[in-house]
Image (cartoon, rainbow, N blue to C red):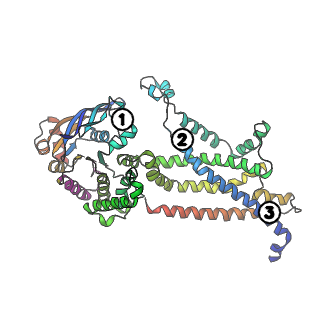
Amino acid sequence: MAILEVHNIEKHFGPTRVLEDISFDLEQGQALAIIGSSGSGKTTLLRCLNFLETPDKGTISVLGNVIFDAADPATQRESEVRKKRLHFGLVFQSFNLFPQYTALENVTLAVKLLAKERPDFKANKKQIYEQIEAHGMELLSDIGLANRASHYPHQLSGGQQQRVAIARALALKPDILCFDEPTSALDPELTGEVLRVIRGLAEQKTTMIIVTHEMAFARDVADQVIFMDSGVIVEQGPARRVIEHPAQERTRQFLSRYAENA
Amino acid sequence: MLEFFASPTTQTVLGALNEGFLRTLELFCITLIGALPLGLLIALGSMNQFGPLKFLRRGDQGPILDKILGIRPISFVCRLLVWVVRGTPLVLQIIILFYVPGMQRLFNWPSGERGRMLAVCIAFVLNYACYFSEIYRGGIQGVSVGQQEAGLVLGMTKSQIFFKVTLLQMIKRIVPPISNEVITLVKDTSLARVIALQEVIWMGESFMKGNRGISGLVWPLFFTAVYYLVFSGVVTILLARLEKKLEYFR
């Protein structure tokens, strides 16, 4: 069964239609890359999945449960949206680390706040916090930043900041991890370290959706690729097939323009 | 020199100036304690999005009806208050607040110095809260939307995001402009003399006209400047320390 099913998502900003009839499935353990030119709606789609935007039409289901239905206001209640967001993690283009917290605190803050809602929190507070911190350290060492745990974001390079942001998203153990152009704000020499971390996650069968402009990366790491243009899905299929042998003329144009610039 | 300080006249004058300065200090502290949190409330109020008629908006009803349906009452009232309070002199607010309630038989302030102090404190708290609120608003809006969104996708509640993420970043941003206002407040406290609150300048001036059997002295008035200089010096150092403390992040 698909872990994520998106059906007929449509989104307008005022009179402008930014997403139209978006439907796709994602299997557990697969990585999906979304490619397309700027303004094609890729980021808006990710933001819809993370409840940062509310689609005007369509449904989103995770593990067979409808978590969003544009036609059913009951699925959009503020109190429940907060919990539903936790199915997804989101890594931003601009990292958005909290500047006043260290790398480790960035990773553990939300987990600690959520732990307060556990019924056994009062009794085991110390133990729970120790566990959370140990897990946070583990995540930081997985991305090779254990020795930067007590550094503040401004003391880290862009690549290191983005890796901490990935650890922060992973700390909440989301079902699906989303990346919104994770390397677009980085100097070229820093993209490698971030892409390596994402590649590592793909090898561990983390379910992911990656909006990216790195075509070679999408081809090598993603299982599926969606090509979007002007708010619609033009083509979707296995990554290698779509990027190396696109079936649609528009996809071909986009990829060849890309190859010229690269 | 020593003789001058030892003379009974000087002792009386300095005693009176100290007494006046304590009142100045009291007004200063009460204003800060009241206006800093009240300003935050007004700032949050003026950014409040609550609009009871918003659901009637369709976007095709024309600009005038759209404006009316989009009205946000809490925000409107807060902005109106800020406009009136910032748009009129503090001296006028003090005079109105102190004299009008009694003249219109609404209520009477407690008699004597206590009543003056109470009225002046309320005027100062309200006035400075409005100035602070605009500084807060700038500070909150200056924290990037990405910070809020990062909090949201991490499952944090709006209040957790405000207190754990936005607040400290806002405080860091507003320390310099707030410092400016606080230094101004040090000196603005002297406006309280308009309703004869016996603060330090009132005291200094009184020895020109005659007070406690002393008259015709000019130096006490000049000497009040020393109090202000020392006071604003201390405040400047404290605020600079706070600024330094918040330098650990950017």
Q: Amino acid at mark 1?
A: Gln
Q: Are marks 2 and 1 in contact (CB under 8 Å)?
A: no
Instruction: Decide whether residue A195 is among the magenta residues.
Output: yes
Q: Mark 2: which secondary structure?
A: helix
The residue sitting at the right extreme is B213
Q: Are marks 2 and 1 on the same chain?
A: no
What is the crowding at mark 3: few (fewer than 14 residues within 10 Å), some, or many (at least 20)?
A: many
Do the residues at discs 2 and 3 belong to one chain? yes
How far is mark 2 from mark 1, CA to CA? 25 Å
Image quadrant in which you'd find residue A23:
top left
Is residue B212 in view?
A: yes
Q: Residue flagged by tag 2: what amino acid is it? A: Gly
Considering depth in this image, is A234 or A202 the residue closer to the camera? A202
The residue at which mark 1 appears reads as A76
Q: Nearer the viewer, residue B236 or B48?
A: B48
Subunit ID for the residue under disc 1: A
Q: Is residue A150 above or below residue B80?
A: below
Q: Chain of mark 3?
A: B
Label 2 vs label 1, nearer the camera = 1
Mark 1 residue element? helix
Between disc 1 and disc 3, the foreground one is 1
Q: Which of marks 3 and 2 precedes in the sequence?
A: 3
Distance from disc 1 to disc 3, alpha carbons, whole Å, reads: 66 Å
Q: Which residue carries the number 3 mark?
A: B16
Residue at image location 68% in from the left, 53% down from the top: B188
